[in-house]
Structure formats: structure tokens, C-alpha cells
Image (cartoon, helix red, strand yellow):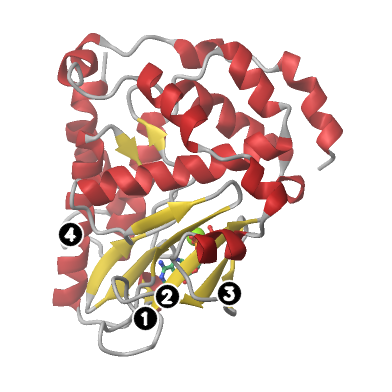
Amino acid sequence: MQLSEFDDYDDIDLSPYYAKPNRKARTRNRKKQTGAEQHVDYFSQIDFDTAEEYSAFEYFIGEGIIASGGPVLKQGKEACVYRCPAEGTERSREVAVKVYKNIEHRSFQALSAYLQGRLAEAGINRRDSMHILSTPSELQAFWVYSEFSVMQRLHDAGLPVPVPYAKCATAFAMEFIYEDDKQDEPALRLHEYQCGPGEAQNNKRMLLNAIERMLELNIIHGDLSPYNILVRNGKPVIIDFPQAVDARYNIRGREMLERDILNVCRYCPHERMSPQEETARLTERLWEPFSH
Ligand SMILES: Nc1ncnc2c1ncn2[C@@H]1O[C@H](COP(=O)(O)OP(=O)(O)OP(=O)(O)O)[C@@H](O)[C@H]1O
Ligand SMILES: [Mg+2]
């Protein structure tokens, strides 16, 4: 992808994403944070200078979060996760630092389609959206901001996600998840984790419960699968949220929720129902507050 492609942003139609939330969801969320407040958060929270002045490691060392940089733990499609020694004693031995790949390396089509929705959901007006879409460093920072702020909200609500520590314009630092809290082995992903049917059933129940609790906060993961779930002490921990969406605004919300549920139902199928049937029933029930 060439950055010049961002010059075409005038062709992007953002209007569907500015639809008002429906009445049921609006009533439910009257007391919750509005999009406009999130907008203010976005511009005040991101320190854009950090991208040029420091590397992510230097930034987190300066913040007293890590003692030094560390080796790559996993190289993903969107980002690279490093395991770094923690500074001080408040955190566990290590910190996971997720550094996003340069925006130029991502597929423009997927990115712009996705971001059109996200920017509007964050309450960012059309003019500011255009600015962000055409400025690579802001686009990068928005991506980090999206994942970090979703993790903060989920962690504050007691959902099983790594504790988010701090972010800069290109990366964020979070709790390192071990297979077993007393050992040094990084947690396996759910698709690699071997367990009996009883334990799988229990994991499924916890994950469906987490999906429902996220939805109470209007959050849909959007890429939930056994590849984005770690297992710590035999229990699931959900990771990888950059594509999470707000169920009130995103026109593909129901579809994304359905896909997340289907991935969990496929992981541990019901005795008497196909994963598709079970997913259809659950989606119908969970989506009810958001349907028109
Ligand atoms: N907090 C953490 N503690 C331990 N391991 C982690 C943590 N966060 C991520 N990882 C490891 O790093 C991998 C990549 O992380 P993540 O899924 O967030 O990035 P990604 O770029 O989206 O990767 P992918 O393309 O594989 O989905 C995870 O599959 C997991 O193995
Ligand atoms: Mg992932």
C-alpha cells in the first residue's frame, strides 16, 4: 500500500456510520459515556510526539514500566509482541509490549473500510476523521488508542483481559500472560491448548459470558477466535482488540457478533445443536437490545 492512496479519502462515504443509535440502545446507554466525550479523550490522550522522539521501548522505560527492551514473543499480522523485563515490583516479572507495524504495511482497503466505522464510533467528526485518515502518524496512533481504550474499559469492568499499563503513539504495554502464574512459560492460545470435554465446556461458558458482558458495554470484539484467546491457569484471557466495534453504531455489528459467537460455538459444539443453530439462537437473544 502506498501512503498516497490516502489522498483518495474524499471518496470515502462516512455517512452510514453517523446514524443515530436506535431508541432502545440509547435509553440503555443514556448514562454511559457519549461518543463526543470519547472524541475529547482521543485528542487529549495521544502524545503524537512520542512517535518521532522515542522508540516504544524508550518511552515505556521512561514511564517506569519496563527495565529494558526484550525479545520478540510473536510476530503477528498487525503487530509484533515483545516480552520485556518489568521495572519495579508492582507488575509481574515481565511486560508484553505490542508494537504496531507501520501503517504502510497494512492493506489499505481493509484498513479504510474498518476505520470509517471506528472513527465515527469514537465520536470523531467528519472533518477530523478526514485529517486522521490522511495523516499516517495519527492513523497509527488511533489504532493503538482503539485497542488500548477498549482493553481499559473491559479490564475496569472485570473482564478477563491483560491489564493495560500504558500507551504511546505506536505501541502499548500490558500484563504478560503466563500459562501458569508460577512459571515462565508464555500462555498457549486456546487452539493449541489440550483439555478434556468438561474443561472445554467450561471455557465455552466463560467465553459466551464474556461476549455478553462486553455487549453490555456496547463492545463487540470482532475477531474473537481460539487464536485470540490465551489460557492462564486453565482459564481463558481474551486479547487482540484493535478491530473491536461499538454495537450501537457499527452497521456490521450483528454480523461481527454472530461471527464471534460462531467461533466459540465451533470450539466446543453443543450436544444437540449445530454450532450454526446455537449461534443463531444466542445472537438473536443478545442482539435484541440493539435491534430496531
Ligand atoms: N499479554 C500477552 N501475554 C502473553 N502473550 C501475548 C500477550 N499478548 C499477545 N501475546 C502473544 O502474541 C500473539 C500476537 O498478539 P496479538 O494477537 O495481539 O497480535 P496480532 O498482530 O493481531 O497477531 P495475529 O495476527 O497473530 O492475530 C498472541 O497470539 C499471543 O501468543
Ligand atoms: Mg491476534
Quick check: can you spot residue 102? no
Left or right, 287 with respect to 134, comes to left
Decide which of tag 4 and tag 2 comes sooner along the chain: 2
Quick check: can you spot residue 57? yes
Taking depth in this image into account, of 221 and 147 the one nearest to the observer is: 147
Badge 3: few (under 14), some or many (20 or more) residues near its Cα, within 10 Å? some
Contact, mark 3 vs mark 2 (Cβ under 8 Å): no
Helix, strand or loop at label 4? It is helix
Left or right, 237 with respect to 206, comes to right
Amino acid at circle 3: Gly
| Picture coordinates of residue 225, whole percent (x, y) | 40, 58
Decide which of tag 1 and tag 2 comes sooner along the chain: 2
Decide which of tag 3 and tag 2 comes sooner along the chain: 3
User: Which disc number belongs to residue 86?
Assistant: 2
User: Which disc number belongs to residue 93?
Assistant: 1
| Res 203 → quadrant | bottom left
Residue under label 3? 69
Helix, strand or loop at label 2? It is loop
User: Which disc number belongs to residue 206?
Assistant: 4
Task: Determine the CA span between mark 3 and mark 4.
Answer: 34 Å
Task: Determine the CA span between mark 1 and mark 3.
Answer: 13 Å
Contact, mark 1 vs mark 2 (Cβ under 8 Å): yes
Task: Determine the CA span between mark 1 and mark 2.
Answer: 6 Å
Amino acid at circle 1: Arg
Amino acid at circle 2: Ala
| Res 10 → quadrant | top right
Helix, strand or loop at label 3? It is loop
| Picture coordinates of residue 256, whole percent (x, y) | 40, 38
Q: Quadrant of the C terminus?
A: top left
User: Which is more foreground, mark 1 or mark 4?
Assistant: 1
Decide which of tag 3 and tag 4 comes sooner along the chain: 3
User: Which disc number belongs to residue 246?
Assistant: none
